[in-house]
Amino acid sequence: MTGASSGIGESFARRLAAEGTDLVIVARRAEQLERLAAELGDAHGVTVEVLAADLGAPVSRREVERRLADSSAPIDLLVNNAGFGTHGNFSELPADREDQEVQVNVVALQRLTSAALGPMLARGRGHVLNVSSIAALYPVPGSATYAATKAFICSFSDALHEELRGTGVVVTSALPGFTRTEFQERSDWTGQDRLPAGAWLSADRVAAESLDGVWAGRARVVSDRRYRLITSITAPIPPGMKRWLMGRSSGLTW
Ligand SMILES: NC(=O)c1ccc[n+]([C@@H]2O[C@H](COP(=O)([O-])OP(=O)(O)OC[C@H]3O[C@@H](n4cnc5c(N)ncnc54)[C@H](OP(=O)(O)O)[C@@H]3O)[C@@H](O)[C@H]2O)c1
């Protein structure tokens, strides 16, 4: 479980622990992870391993890859949830931060999936849940890199879902809409006030619906009926029209 130190990842960890699942939790903030591990261990009698790592740094990331590849302590479900967004005109955003966004949201997710699949295929079972966003479905002026990383995750996960059919290993992507977490503040997005209260999802709900989708073997999970309606109504819109519409409503980031 990556990105378990806050938000949706913490909700995933809480839900899985409550179901009696032992966990390996990953993020940079070791203190938060240690506190969560102690709490979940006490409350549910599960073992929670803490792996503090920066998924944007190749050396640190390799530790996580090694843990996933360790067949003596196999992982049944990999949740690639860690990620962040950036906001602003791409030409004005620091290139290094944009690069980190690709490293964490895309490269780490791809490498961790690669490390996990070997042991899962050898055992003939396993699940990978990759956290994308409904931003994957639209170009998002103002968050160009973020939306592109999330589009990568959907396309990558859909392809693996099909490649792995019949192997016992299933890859699912989750596409949450606006969810109240630390995400908005960390991405310097200030558009929260313009959103109606009803647009917001809770991290617990996103985690619960995404995990239900995993256990049902689904390829994609869009949380919440309203977001499922929006994504299906907008799906047939031609790309040029979608781009134009998003250009007119830019400033919103999932
Ligand atoms: N909130 C939304 O509206 C929304 C909507 C759609 C999709 N999502 C996606 O949901 C996922 C979780 O985000 P959230 O909303 O729960 O935000 P969040 O509260 O900011 O959580 C992000 C998590 O990712 C971890 N992380 C970030 N950079 C990392 C790095 N370099 N190395 C290791 N871990 C890193 C953070 O831990 P540390 O800082 O401790 O490292 C944190 O645990 C993200 O992939 C996000 O894109 C969010």
Image (tube, rainbow, N blue to C red):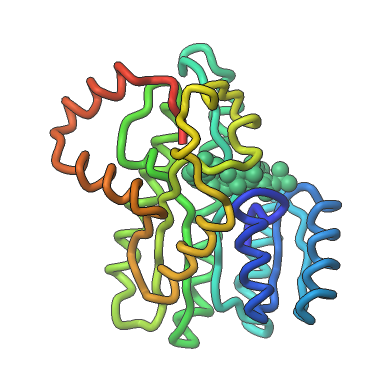
Residue 243, horizontal then vertical, whole percent: 24, 25
For the question of whether residue 196 can be seen, the reply is yes
Residue 5 vertical placement versus 36 (above, below): above
Do we see residue 58 in this rendering?
no
Rendered residue at 48%/53% (across/down) = 131
Q: Quadrant of ligand 1?
A: top right
x then y, percent, for residue 222: 37, 54
Camera-side residue: 117 or 82? 82
Rendering coords of residue 171 (x, y %): 40, 67
Q: In the figure, is residue 34 to the left or right of 156?
A: right
Q: The N terminus lies in which quarter of the figure?
A: bottom right
Vertical relation: 86 (above or below) 180: above
Residue name at image x 35 percent, y 82 percent? 167
The picture quadrant where one finds residue 245 is top left
The residue at the point 46 percent across, 63 percent down is 209
- Res 18 quadrant in image: bottom right
Q: Position of residue 192 (x, y in %)?
A: 54, 27
User: Is residue 243 shown above or below 198?
Assistant: above
* Residue furthest front as drawn: 197
Q: Residue furthest top?
A: 92
- Apparent side of residue 18 relative to residue 237 in the rendered image (left or right): right
Q: Is residue 93 above or below residue 12?
A: above
Q: Nearer the viewer, residue 165 or 17?
A: 17
